[in-house]
Amino acid sequence: MKKQLFLIVALGGCLTLYATDRKFSSPDGRLQVVVSDEGGSPSYQVNYDGVTFLEKSPLGLVTNIGDFSQGLSFSGELKLDKVDETYSLQTIKQSNVHYQATEAVCSFQQQDRTVFDIVFRVSNRDVAFKYKVYPKGGTLCCVVNEEKTGFVLPAGSTTFLCPQSGPMGGFARTSPSYETSYTVDDEMGKNGWGQGYTFPCLFKNSDKGWVLISETGVDSRYCASRLIGHADGLYTVGYPQEGEYNGNGTVCPGIPLPGETPWRTVTVGQTLAPIVETTVSFDLVAPLYEASQPYQYGCGTWSWIIGGDASMTYDDQKRYIDFSAAMGYQSVLVDALWDTRVGYDKIEELARYAQSKNVALYLWYNSNGYWNDAPQGPRGKMGNIITRRKEMKWMKSIGIRGIKVDFIGSDKQVTMQLYEDILADANDYGLLVIFHGCTLPRGWERMYPNYASSEAVLASENMNFSQGSCDAEAFNACLHPFIRNTVGSMDFGGSTLNHYYNMKNQPKASRRVTSDVFALATAVLFQSPVQHFALAPNNLTDAPAWAIDFMKRVPTTWDEVRFVDGYPGKYVVLARRHGDTWYVAGINAEKEPLKIKVSLPMFEAGEELSFYTDDKELKGSVETKKLNKKQQTDLFIPCNGGVLIYNE
């Protein structure tokens, strides 16, 4: 077929196109996508400032009504539009967002019938796309058996990936739950432990920049996905594993026709700033229902992280309510086993006591029982609409603020339905929802107004379990701001000030190896609108007064985030703004002390700032200093140490 040259006037100017190539760019013209139908198999490529960040990568779907990955050609002309939207959302990294992008709709036909559109959105730092599949005659639904969508990284790229675990493994057969360790600076051509990798996935494009791949907009109408590694830099979208959810539910999603897939997202940056600062997970979605009431966020405490199951007593929970009140916190998380070790009647009594202290309770629940063996209760309350709504009605009647639902462990469409059902019912009863032992949130902060946060990370509980996790705390903490926490709220439950993970803070359990300043810094580095910190009542007397004073004031909602410096797994320095106050937080996981000069343009020259710093022995101190005329300062951060700067 001859390639005919033609011109099309698009956003940002004139683009020269061939019949088998369609090109479009971001509003600033620097991020470009090239879509092709060459050979009948659709593909796309991503370039930034003329440098390739994704090589020619496959597109297409295989469904039970046809193979829409080959024998395809462009249908009609490229449809271009401008997206210019603003929205406000207090539960993400940036409270007010101005989203601008080029939208391009590429229609593909097979045997003279349009089978699907691929809708692209290209902002100045993100490429996103989804499929819109059309009916075939009188067929108004289909199953998507396979998604051919791929991402081909340039040769020489390195990976920062978290392997997906196999189904029905781990504790009480509850995996996968997005709680495995990352491998950093690794070569391509691998596939994790054989099951691929969990989103989001970070890649370094040699010395040219960074690529973050993920997805958003997943709800009950589709399954969640993972990334499957292949040879030659190719990674493809993979659906859930057959054995997940104890084999219940289908692996392949079913959709109505016309119907859409979730968005696949690619964030590109010459530095890590676009990766850290991206809001693409939220830009592409919309609320699925109205909030039933204004929801309250903020700080809280929980006894389990320090005291374990033995702390699930009425007296200990009351002690933590008093502790939260003394800290000026909003809540206490009452964790697993409360139904048998405290009891429903005593929970009502605790709720009344908490209200008298201006503190609210969150209650832990097992997601259900027929898909895992987790014995902790309450069980069997969240998986059935009748029992779930009855339980939620009771919680509303006694003033419970929210729930933490654990042990879900699947990405199947039926599981996405469970997440959505829990959220929608909880909204009816004015309850916030936190998920644990769960999948990655995919735009849920904006989609579900009462969604608070998800674990989906190797979180603080593991430091209670093992010294190895304590020893790796700084390494992992230097990953999350660049990977997991970039796309959604992360319920980590950290910032402990105990030296040991036990109620008496004595050397007979896991030992914390990070500094007190490190603990304060992660309270800023880790983003979640609800933070149940791993503090303990004894910290009021055995922790430095300056540390407790800061933890009393640290916010949990943010108006802005800026990348300052860092490298995944080595060190990180970020700035977050709450109102008029900027907080700059940094930590170091490298063996040698970190000595760097950073620019802090968010502060004024000569402005007085509070500096929390560590010496070589990880002993913290606080001083007030003025920022120099160049708005720069030298930072010294020892291994496992931190730094914290803010303006009053």
Image (cartoon, rainbow, N blue to C red):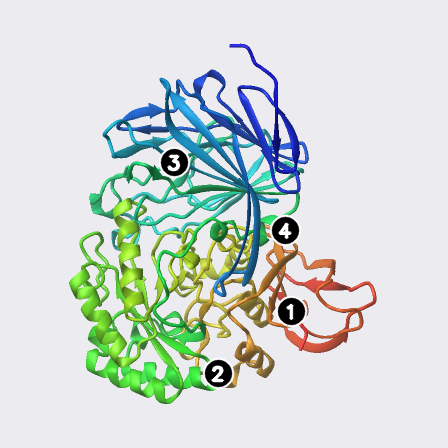
**Residue at numbered disc 3:** 132
Residue 273, numbered label: 4
Callout 2 secondary element: helix
Residue 372, numbered label: none
**Which mark is first along the chain, 3 or 2?**
3
**Which mark is first along the chain, 1 or 2?**
2
> Looking at the image, is 115 positioned above or below residue 225?
above
Report the amino acid beneath label 1: Trp
Residue 327, numbered label: 2
Residue 582, numbered label: 1
Callout 3 secondary element: strand
Q: Nearer the viewer, residue 83 or 220?
A: 83
Residue drawn at (37%, 66%) of the image = 291
Looking at the image, the residue that sits furthest to the bottom is 356
Residue drawn at (78%, 70%) of the image = 627
Q: Residues within 10 Å of mark 3 (few under 14, many from 20)?
A: some
Q: CA distance from mark 2 to mark 4?
A: 34 Å
**Disc 2 vs disc 1: which is toward the camera?**
1
Report the amino acid beneath label 2: Met
**Which mark is first along the chain, 1 or 4?**
4
Q: Does the CB distance between marks 3 and 4 fall below 8 Å?
A: no
